[in-house]
Image (spheres, helix red, strand yellow):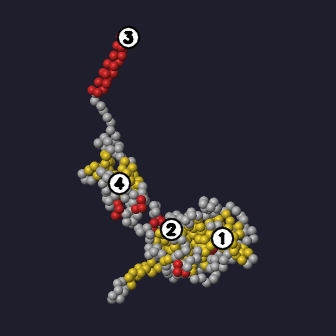
Amino acid sequence: MRIKFLSVILSFLLMSIAISSCLDSDENYEYSSDATIRAFGIDTITKGVYYKFTIDQLKREIYNVDSLPMGADSIIKRILIDTLTVTGWVTSGLNDTVFNMNDSVDLRKPIKLKVHAADGITTREYTIKVNVHTQDPDSLIWREMPSLPASPASGKQRSVVLNEDLLVYTSTTTAYRTSVSNPASIQWGNLITISGLPSDAKLTSIINFDNRLYTTAENGKAFYSDNGTNWEEMDMQGMYMVTFLAGIPADEVTGSENMLTGIFAKDGKNFFCAKSAGETTWKEGEEVPSDFPLKEIYSTVFTNASGIKQTVVVGNVEETVEATIPWFSKDGLVWADMSTPTDFSCPAMKNPAIVYYGSQFHMMGGEFKTIYSSLAGIAWNESADKFRYASEKVIIKGDEDEEETIEYESLFEGKGDYSLAIDKNHYIWIVWNQDGSVWRGRLNKLGFKQQ
């Protein structure tokens, strides 16, 4: 028993010596030399929007790719940095004062932060830059582009976007083409030759559906093209096509597929028709009302309050009208007019074009004096001052007792017939028949990466 007890005592003595030895020795701790900023962010801006910041460790720069909205200078004059992840500590200013995240900072100009590693030796300096838009997001800005090399000989033309190209058909055998993939470089090049279209093909009825172009001819035949240059006749199974209307996109809510819609004639009457992309058989719809547009048709798509996509069309009608009335459909077989009391209707226009653009409907065309806008496509008003055609400022001098006033006169007024198309970058292209001039416009905020 004594031997066992002695062994226990010796064990405790050895442990005590070891612990004592450790306590008496000098400890060597190695502190981190990491002096990088791992995460950075500022407080939310207007409407609670949080802007992501990029950290370039090589250049030691921190910036936001998506610029803050115009007018945010007043907000970032005094704003909190709410995210700043480092392993050591941060100083700022000429005196290297320890940075306090509870203090607001002025980010209207670039600032510098110095990161100190935990070892107290290594430091890195970062430049913080906050980008702010200098453009008014709600302004529609126009720019004159290179004109067509020659104006359309026939006096009629059609503009349509197909994939990365803007095609302007000047006749049934000729067209101009330019790429819209690079908005900074627009070149029309030489006139291209179109094959497969008859001389009586309706240029103004060309539409794009599912990256394929369609049109009709005066004799009721229909044609399609995958590249915009070579056209082939469609097998319409004896149907006499009056015109194509629009492509109706697939809808997840209703479960409907992409639909090509049009109007065909039978027994002296016109009827709506539609078919999906994979079908050959057309479905017959209702009879076409007498005030439904049949020529120079433009279409647009919007999503209603129920989340269902609807296609809206306008165009020229064969009878005299007092207002420009859009028509909408969910399946292409039944169309309903979006009429409204006269006080709220869109004035009658020759060759109207409708676009759903910037969360509103806009109607262009006519004499090109004024753009008309509507939230739901029913009640129309003159568009806001910022959303106008390219204009020149005119100062009107008043009488002795009146101040000068400023008005804007549209540069497009009186330019005549035109065609319009919108590309994937939200640019509105207008090509004029009379002189072949080309203008491109875009709502500023639709060019911003963060809306």
Q: Name the residue under label 1.
A: 334
What residue type is disc 2 on? Ser
Which mark, by number, is residue 26?
none
x and y, in percent, of residue 268 in the image: 73, 78
Distance (Cα) linking label 4 and label 3: 70 Å
Residue 408 vertical position relative to residue 119 in the rendered view, above or below: below
Q: Do the residues labelled 1 and 3 touch (CB within 8 Å)?
A: no
Q: Name the residue under label 4.
A: 81
- At 31% across and 34% down in the image, what residue appears? 29
Q: Determine whether, in the image, residue 370 is placed left or right of residue 59.
A: right
Q: How crowded is mark 1: few (under 14 residues within 10 Å), some or many (20 or more)?
A: some
Q: Mark 3 points at which residue?
A: 1
Sooner in the amino-acid sequence: mark 3 or mark 2 = 3
Depth-wise, is mark 2 or mark 1 nearer the camera?
Answer: 1
Which mark, by number, is residue 359?
2
Q: What element does badge 1 sit on?
A: loop
What residue type is disc 3 on? Met
Sooner in the amino-acid sequence: mark 2 or mark 1 = 1
What residue type is disc 1 on? Val
Distance (Cα) linking label 1 and label 3: 105 Å
Q: What element does badge 3 sit on?
A: loop
Distance (Cα) linking label 3 and label 2: 94 Å
List the single residue furthest toward the left: 95
